[in-house]
Amino acid sequence: MDLNKLGWNAYQKKHLKSFSQQGSDVGRICSENKNSYFLLSEYGELFATVSGKFRNNSVGREDYPAVGDWVVFEKIENEDKAVIHKVLPRKSKFSRKIAGNATQEQILASNIDTVFIVSSLNYDFNPRRIERYLTMVWDSGAKAVIVLTKSDLCNNLDDILYQVEAIAFDTRMHVISNTLNQGIEVLKLYLQEGSTVALIGSSGVGKSTLTNKLMGNEIIETDTLRKNIEKGKHTTTTREMYILPDGGLIVDTPGMRELQLWDVDNGLNQYFDDIETIAENCRFSDCKHDTEPGCAVKDAISKGLLDKGRLKNYFKMKNELDFLSKRQTQKASQIEKEKWKDIHKQIKKIKKK
Ligand SMILES: Nc1nc2c(ncn2[C@@H]2O[C@H](COP(=O)(O)OP(=O)(O)OP(=O)(O)O)[C@@H](O)[C@H]2O)c(=O)[nH]1
Ligand SMILES: [Mg+2]
Ligand SMILES: [Zn+2]
């Protein structure tokens, strides 16, 4: 396997230099399952785990390899196995908060050039959701492209496109139908040799079906292929990266049921620029745009200059972020407490001696 075909480039090469004492074999993670991985390398596909030292040096989940990562590894002789020593710095990453009590970052994919925000054009269509995905992608360092699927099931295309255009600004949009094989070919332009595309979007919008189309092969299980088993569940359960026959790499991800965001403060400011600019004219600098007099945001809404749904989305996202940052602070103080406990223990020990 040629590393350039896997997306190896100057960015990674530059960073590898500082780790060369740990060996020079590099590979790219193509699938992740709990604590084991598959990576693609000059030796082909290898089954891999991280070294003991790696584990000792890792604190959070984000320190561990994720799909799309470049890693430094050592091949085990005469076996298709490898030990991972290091994750090379990520050029881009997109992540979300892990479901559960502790706030942790889960990296969905890394070193992605373009993210296809996949959304279906049937009854499931939701511009607010696209807006949230856009914010997430902007924050990741990757380029966003909107892919609208199931055009064969849509009879108000113009109306929908109008709604998407209002939120997409200069983001590229493509309308496709997997069933009718329409609009697929042009998407291959994003998948030149060495470039990586990740697909995100709700469950059932056709991400895996599209991946299969681009691969020219039904390799991934889709909802149609397993129609009667466990209805209503996500079909795709893990993230996987595939190499396309004509070059390019594609990462298929499971649909995100609840889109939780992580550290998208910058994305929020950038994306809701218009609202924040309008808000500068509110009478009170801490205006909540609720019942305060002289609120420029409310005024813009009543004049039809700002969409109500957009403001609602802005509030929703702000709440989510406030909540997250509170939880993070809480967690930090917990760690601090534990550290002090440790220090006190050590002091006691010394005193005993
Ligand atoms: N009519 C129509 N159906 C489609 C199209 N694309 C996909 N489907 C169908 O939509 C269903 C869901 O497709 P999947 O590809 O499994 O969806 P997914 O986005 O991968 O879903 P998860 O893996 O659960 O996140 C399947 O029954 C597909 O056949 C399309 O363009 N038109
Ligand atoms: Mg799928
Ligand atoms: Zn206001």
Image (cartoon, helix red, strand yellow):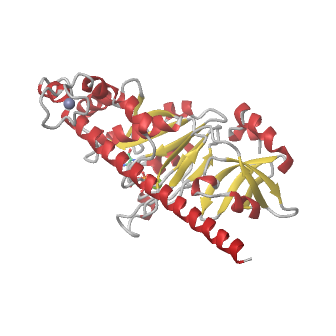
Q: Nearer the viewer, residue 243 or 25?
A: 25
Placement of 80 over or under 289, stated as above or below: below
User: Which residue is pictured at 39% across the width and 64% down the height?
Assistant: 233
User: Which residue is pictured at 46% across the width and 62% down the height?
Assistant: 102
Splitting the image into 4 quarters, where does residue 150 fall? top left
Say whether residue 232 is left or right of residue 57. left
Mark yes or no: residue 147 visible. Answer: no
From the top left corner, tell me how far across and down residue 187 is, in percent: 50, 34
From the top left corner, tell me how far across and down residue 33 is, in percent: 60, 63
From the top left corner, tell me how far across and down residue 134 is, in percent: 40, 37
Q: Quadrant of the C terminus?
A: bottom right
Placement of 179 over or under 281, stated as above or below: below
User: Which residue is pictured at 28% across the width and 42% down the height?
Assistant: 126
Ligand 3 falls in quadrant: top left
Q: Nearer the viewer, residue 11 or 343?
A: 343
Mark yes or no: residue 309 visible. Answer: yes
Considering every residue shown, the one lying at the far bottom of the view is 352
Q: Nearer the viewer, residue 294 or 229?
A: 294
| Number of marks in the rendered image | 0
Q: Nearer the viewer, residue 295 or 43?
A: 295
Placement of 284 over or under 147, stated as above or below: above
Splitting the image into 4 quarters, where does residue 348 fall? bottom right
From the top left corner, tell me how far across and down residue 103 is, in percent: 46, 57
Say whether residue 251 is left or right of residue 52. left
Q: Quadrant of the N terminus?
A: top right
Considering every residue shown, the one lying at the far right of the view is 77
Say whether residue 57 is left or right of residue 316. right
